[in-house]
Amino acid sequence: MYLIRLFCRTINSEKKAIIFYIVNTAVLLLIFSLTVTEAVIAYPALISLTILAVYLTIKAVSLHGFLNDLNSAKQSKGYEPAPETSKESHVFETIEEIHANYNDRITTMDEKLAGRNSMFSSFIHNMKSSVAVIELACVNKSLGALDDIELENEKLKSNLEQALNILRLDEFSNDYAPERVDLHALVSKVINEKKRDFIYAGVFPKLSGETTYIYTDKKWCAYIMEQIIANAIKYSLPGKNVYTEISVGEKRTVLTIRDEGIGIEAEDIPRVFDLFFTGKNGRDHKAATGIGLFMVRHIAKQLGIEVSLASTVGTGTSVSLSFLSKL
């Protein structure tokens, strides 16, 4: 059965050559018939058919080898076939490129999945800790129980929001709605939403700069600011300030969020945007997850916002968001 299929595929692949050969043979036989008797024509016709049969047999063997090599190349990357023509060489080179491309994509997806699993494990661990604290507060019913419950509830909301934002990243284009945004008003709104955090930490917000408009996604841009301001509050000492300053240039509008906190070690600065990297400050502050600044850099890239960070230990940290000046 396989031989019949192979023979049919050989005929199909060589049909142009077969047609040309038959037409050419017919013409030669016609010319030959005009010069000799009909009885002699059978001999060259038989020779012609024999040559055609040998040709098709050689091509069938070649096709059989090519199909075997092709099947092996499809099964595994790095297979070294023995192509007989330049066309076959191009086929195997293309298959090798496809293998390499898909292996790279699979590796990227595996790394992404591993990172996501780690992130969600961290969120679940943090939420379990908050639930445990709430349960203890409910049992003890001390005077500060409600305050503890309220604080842990905020942590739960924060972790849930982070998890939802990570899930939305894959569908960012579907959740992206650029619009004309008043940057000063947006910063003021984010600061106001963080009012409780400022009060609890004993840190004071300072906003300066003129009203200016940018073109961006309001929700995601606010999320970036929230992450940066949250870090500024977290690593600031009571009585210090967090400054948010807007400066407008000819081509860029820059929002700088600067704190007077503990600062970041020089060797940690190149890695602060890496996933799960917390550095020395993170080891000293158990609430650090190493996710916030990673999300800032990732989302900012999607929005076309340039992010830069500078810090000095004991002096503070400043993070700048640079927008194209539009409208």
Image (cartoon, grey):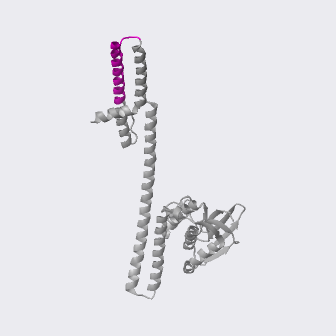
Q: Toward the viewer: 148 or 39?
A: 39
x then y, percent, for residue 321: 62, 64
Tell me: residue 123, above or below residue 42. below
Q: Residue at x 66, y 72 (%)?
A: 184
Q: Residue at x 46, y 42 (%)?
A: 97
| Residue 25 lies within the magenta run | no
Asked if one can make out residue 27 in the rendered structure from this viewpoint, the answer is yes
x then y, percent, for residue 30: 41, 17
Please identify the quadrant where the N terminus is shown. top left
Q: Is residue 327 left or right of residue 291?
A: right
Q: Toward the viewer: 275 or 305?
A: 305
Classify residue 273 by image quadrant: bottom right
Q: Is most of the magenta stretch helix, strand or loop?
A: helix
Classify residue 126 by image quadrant: bottom left
Q: Is residue 82 left or right of residue 221?
A: left
Tell me: residue 187, above or below residue 73. below
x then y, percent, for residue 243: 64, 72
| Residue 36 lies within the magenta run | yes
x then y, percent, for residue 252: 68, 62
Q: Residue at x 33, y 16 (%)?
A: 42
Q: Which residues are magenta?
A: 35-61
Asked if one can make out residue 318 in the rendered structure from this viewpoint, the answer is no
Classify residue 7 by image quadrant: top left
